[in-house]
Structures are given as structure tokens and as C-alpha cells.
Image (cartoon, rainbow, N blue to C red):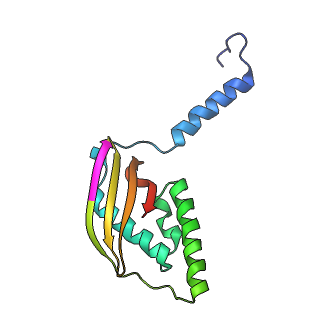
């Protein structure tokens, strides 16, 4: 066993080792060259988010595509949508929509910022998404339906 430098406590060393282990098991960045094509993922994620908000898909089905913060926000927004539908007496129905365009840019390696324009029956909406490459796949770190 290695000796500790003078003035270093065993608790400090244990926490330092725990930190290194947690960093090892934390999500690892993946270079863009090792990630799949981004547009099919953006299409599927956008459709999934719209279906969650319409009440025809469970938000848990999107959990693997989202990081913790956008997942929690989507859960909250889906619950608010469900309460609004119940208050009006409107049943959940699959939203008729058409993806009009997808615009994306890459401000850094393994990062994509995109806007998906969706035509709904009564209006046109934009879905803003930020993706980051983690553990060999895309994950959304931010999702906003405007």
C-alpha cells in the first residue's frame, strides 16, 4: 500500500479514489465519427416528444434518449397536458403532423443543436433539441417545444 503524503488523511484518499471510479463509470463522450446519423434520431425523438405530449406514448419510452433534466421537464409537461385534456374532456389522440424541415448545426465535436419544424393541424411548431454523443449514442440534453 502506498504511503500518504504528510498531512493527507485516509478519508481524503478514499474520496479521491471514489471520485476517480465515478468518473470512470460516468457517461463518456463519444466522437462524432463514432455516432450514427443524426437526422433519423432527430425525427424519431421529435415524433416521440409530440406523442408524449398528446398522451399516446409513455414518457418512459424516451428515457434512454434523454438525459435527466429534459426527461424530468418532459414528465412535468406531459402531466400538465394530461390534466388539461381531462379538464376539457378530450381523449388522448395521436397528433396528425408533418415534419416540414430539420435544421442542425454542430458547434463542437459530438454536439448537435437542431430545430425541427412540425406542421400540426392548427399551427406550426418548432422543436429545439440539443444532442450530445455519450456512450456511443446520441442523447438529448435539452428539448423545447415552442
The x, y position of residue 28, in whole percent, is: 45, 42
The x, y position of residue 100, in whole percent, is: 26, 70
Residue 106 highlighted magenta (yes or no): yes
Task: Give me the residue at 61% from left, 33% from top.
Answer: 19
Residue 54 highlighted magenta (yes or no): no
For the C terminus, the image quarter is: bottom left
Q: Main secondary structure of the magenta part?
A: strand
Task: Give me the residue at 37% from left, 80% from top.
Answer: 122
The x, y position of residue 6, in whole percent, is: 71, 9
For the N terminus, the image quarter is: top right
The x, y position of residue 86, in whole percent, is: 59, 85
Residue 138 visible in the displayed image: no
Residue 47 visible in the displayed image: yes
Question: With 143 as the anchor, is 8 left or right in this view?
Answer: right
Task: Give me the residue at 34% from left, 82% from top.
Answer: 121
Image vertical order of residue 36 relative to residue 85, above or below = above
Question: With 91 as the anchor, is 100 left or right in this view?
Answer: left
Task: Give me the residue at 38% from left, 58% from top.
Answer: 128
Based on the displayed image, in which of its 4 quarters is residue 102 positioned? Answer: bottom left
Labels in figure, total: 0
Magenta highlight range: 103-107
Residue ranking furthest to the top: 6
Question: With 111 as the anchor, is 83 left or right in this view?
Answer: right
Image vertical order of residue 110 relative to residue 61, above or below = above
Image vertical order of residue 80 relative to residue 89, above or below = above
User: Who is closer to the viewer here, 128 or 31?
Assistant: 128
Amino acid at each position: 500500500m502506498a504511503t500518504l503524503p504528510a498531512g493527507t488523511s485516509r478519508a481524503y484518499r478514499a474520496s479521491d479514489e471514489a471520485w476517480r471510479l465515478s468518473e470512470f463509470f460516468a457517461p463518456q463522450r463519444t466522437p462524432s465519427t463514432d455516432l450514427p446519423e443524426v437526422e433519423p434520431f432527430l425525427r424519431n425523438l421529435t415524433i416521440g416528444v409530440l406523442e408524449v405530449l398528446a398522451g399516446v406514448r409513455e414518457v418512459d419510452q424516451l428515457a434512454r434518449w434523454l438525459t435527466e433534466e429534459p426527461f424530468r421537464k418532459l414528465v412535468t409537461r406531459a402531466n400538465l397536458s394530461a390534466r388539461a385534456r381531462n379538464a376539457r374532456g378530450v381523449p388522448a389522440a395521436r397528433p396528425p403532423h408533418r415534419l416540414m424541415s430539420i435544421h442542425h448545426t454542430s458547434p463542437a465535436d459530438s454536439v448537435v443543436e437542431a430545430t425541427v419544424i412540425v406542421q400540426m393541424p392548427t399551427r406550426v411548431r418548432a422543436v429545439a433539441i440539443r444532442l450530445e454523443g455519450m456512450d456511443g449514442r446520441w442523447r438529448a440534453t435539452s428539448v423545447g417545444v415552442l
